[in-house]
Image (cartoon, rainbow, N blue to C red):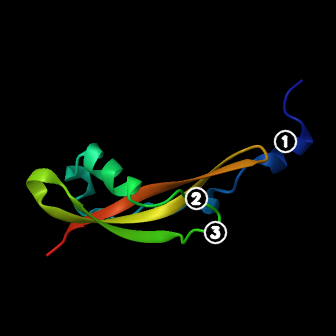
Amino acid sequence: MGNSKLAAGCHVRTTAYDPVPPIGASGILAQVQGNHIAAGLRTLGPATREAPSHHEVLVDAGHLGTVRLFVEKKQARHGRHSHYFWSAYRAELAN
């Protein structure tokens, strides 16, 4: 009963997590509607292991005008299977 001595080594160190981004680091991403972000992500090809890790995409965001989306490739793992996908992390007005 209780915790095994071996279970103590399974925990992830707290320093392994990404630091919290500062306030305002995402620009105007919260103001861009999801359908506009999805349209920008569809212009990229499928995210694969060989694909570059970062992209910039210009998209028409309706009432905001033209917006530059900053996109990064992320990886989701489930057992031995890995799935790559695109995720927008910042947006700013394109002049």
13 lies left or right of 36: right
**Crowdedness near tag 3: few (<14), some (14–19) or many (≥20) residues, C-alpha within 10 Å:** few
- Say which amino acid is labelled 2: Tyr
Specify the label residue 17 is tagged with: 2
Marks 2 and 3, the one that precedes in the sequence: 2
Q: Give coordinates of residue 38: x percent, y percent.
A: 34, 48
Look at the numbered disc 2 and give the secondary structure of its residue.
Answer: loop
- Image point (42%, 70%), residue name: 55
Classify mark 1: helix, strand or loop.
helix
* Number of other residues with Cα within 10 Å of mark 1, as a class: few under 14, some 14 to 19, many 20 or more: few
Tell which residue pokes out farthest to the bottom in this image. Answer: 95
* Residue at the disc numbered 1: 7
Q: Quadrant of the C terminus?
A: bottom left
State yes or no: discs 1 and 3 in contact (Cβ < 8 Å). Answer: no
Instruction: Give the residue type that dot 3 points to.
Output: Glu
Residue 50's label in the rendered image is 3
The one of 60 and 12 positioned closer to us in this rendering: 60
User: Residue 32 location in percent, x, y?
Assistant: 22, 52
